[in-house]
Image (cartoon, helix red, strand yellow):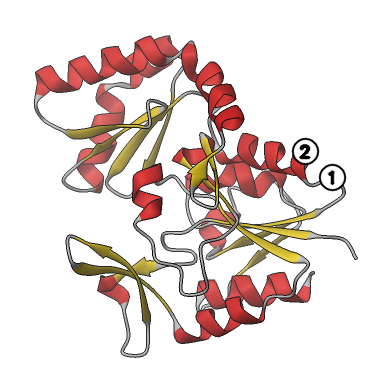
Amino acid sequence: MKKTILACDLDNTLIYSYKHRTPDDVCVELLEGQEQSFITAKTLVQLRQLSENIQLVPVTTRSQAQYLRLVWPLGIPELAVTTNGGLLLCAGEPDVVWRAKSLKLAAEFRPALHKLTEQLDVAQLFHHHMVDEIYLYVVCDDVAAADKCMADFAEFTLKSGLQVCRGGRKVYFLPPNINKGVAVQRLRSMFPNSRLVAAGDSELDLPMLEEADIALLPNAELAAQLQNPHKYVCPRSEHFAEFVLAMAADNA
């Protein structure tokens, strides 16, 4: 039987914040002692019932440290991709070969990222982070401020070759070869002849969804940006994580 790789985004796809919790949800992340992220009780049952030929591989923009804050009720996944594709974790430990290749892909753009960091430090207008020495993101006050940040640094990103993407009130500055699409291409080389089912909720997930044999999305608005014809949109009456796991099971 052909192996199925379920490449699944985490935040707002498989897990979601405390702001959206319901009484039966299961906590999967603590931050400074406070419950931070959750999955539904049904999601936990579905994860438990995944067949042996389905391998869940979380693919997240989170840093390695942010990913490792998660507590998996059924045990940590064997593989996970963090840092927007920059790192592969095997049972929680970084794969040195994968990391070395990512650093090589990002090397040309590291001076631009450091220069951008200096400019942000001088401006003192934005809270920003360099993630695992691979990409940088800026946290803005709101979506309007994030749009302004993108506009303010549009000329810089154009000249540097960095890609820029907004996710809510965060703005991401990324080396062009560090994305979830490249990451799942690298995953495919590890699992020849496998089927790739991918799920994600934001523009950062689009490169991964384009590569998928089956792409799963939460809404028609994001689906409209996807060229991949093999796409399915979660009905409004269903929970996205539960829809993803049900579709993966049906297509395994």
Residue 113 point in image, percent of width and height: 34, 18
- Label 2 crowding class (10 Å Cα cut-off): few <14, some 14-19, many 20+? few
Q: In terms of image quadrants, where is residue 118?
A: top left
Q: Is residue 137 above or below residue 13?
A: above
Front residue of 160/32: it is 32
Q: Position of residue 110 (x, y in %)?
A: 40, 15
Q: How many marks?
A: 2
Q: Position of residue 17 (x, y in %)?
A: 31, 67
Kindly identify the residue that appears in the image at 69 percent across and 36 percent down: 186
Residue 51: quadrant of the picture:
bottom right
Crowding near the residue tagged with mark 1, few <14, some 14–19, many ≥20 C-alpha atoms within 10 Å: few
Q: Is residue 105 left or right of residue 146?
A: right
Q: Is residue 136 left or right of residue 8?
A: left
The C terminus sits in image quarter: bottom right
Helix, strand or loop for disc 1: loop
Nearest the camera: 195 or 164?
195
Question: On the image, numbered disc 2 is attached to which residue?
Answer: 189
The residue positioned 38% from the left and 18% from the top of the image is 157
Whether pointer 1 and pointer 2 mark residues with C-beta atoms closer than 8 Å, the reply is yes
Residue at (36%, 35%) from the top-left corner?
Answer: 172
Q: For the view shown, which residue lies furthest in the bottom direction?
A: 24
What amino acid type should be assigned to the residue bearing mark 2?
A: Ser
